Amino acid sequence: MNRFTKQTASYWKQLGSVVRNEFRTIFKDGGVMLILIFALIIYATAYSLAYGSQVLRNARRPAAV
């Protein structure tokens, strides 16, 4: 392998290591997980309350075939 290929492979390996360590750090932190879970629940609730009245109901034919 030439120098460029070795250097590129090294960069990808380093990037993978950084991403893996960041995800480990994020998912070990209880506060972050609490915020993520509550944000998901709050968003789902707010979205369904805001747009629940605009859901298509009693459609006799499919909109697209």
Image: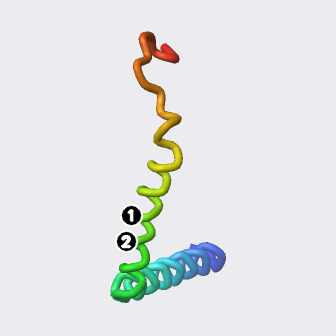
Name the residue rendered at 48%, 13% in the picture.
65
Q: CA distance from mark 1 to mark 2?
A: 6 Å
- Closest to the camera, between mark 1 and mark 2, is 1
Quarter holding residue 23: bottom left
Q: Are dots 1 and 2 in contact, CB under 8 Å? A: yes
- Name which residue type carries label 2: Ile
Name the residue rendered at 47%, 33% in the picture.
55
- Name which residue type carries label 1: Ile
Q: Quadrant of the N terminus?
A: bottom right
> Circle 1 is placed at which residue position?
41
Residue 6 screen position, x and y as percent: 57, 78
Q: Nearer the viewer, residue 40 or 29?
A: 40
User: SS of the residue at dot 1?
Assistant: helix
Q: Nearer the viewer, residue 60 or 6?
A: 60
Name the residue rendered at 39%, 72% in the picture.
38
Mark 2 surroundings within 10 Å by alpha-carbon count, few (fewer than 14), some (14 through 19), many (20 or more): few
Position above or below: 42 against 48:
below
Position above or below: 23 against 60:
below
Mark 1 surroundings within 10 Å by alpha-carbon count, few (fewer than 14), some (14 through 19), many (20 or more): few
Position above or below: 41 against 7:
above
Residue positioned most to the top: 61
From the viewer's perspective, tell me whether residue 30 is left or right of residue 3.
left
Residue 3 screen position, x and y as percent: 64, 79
Name the residue rendered at 48%, 79% in the picture.
19
From the viewer's perspective, tell me whether residue 3 is left or right of residue 62.
right
> Circle 2 is placed at which residue position?
37
Say the numbered circle drawn on residue 19.
Answer: none
User: SS of the residue at dot 2?
Assistant: helix
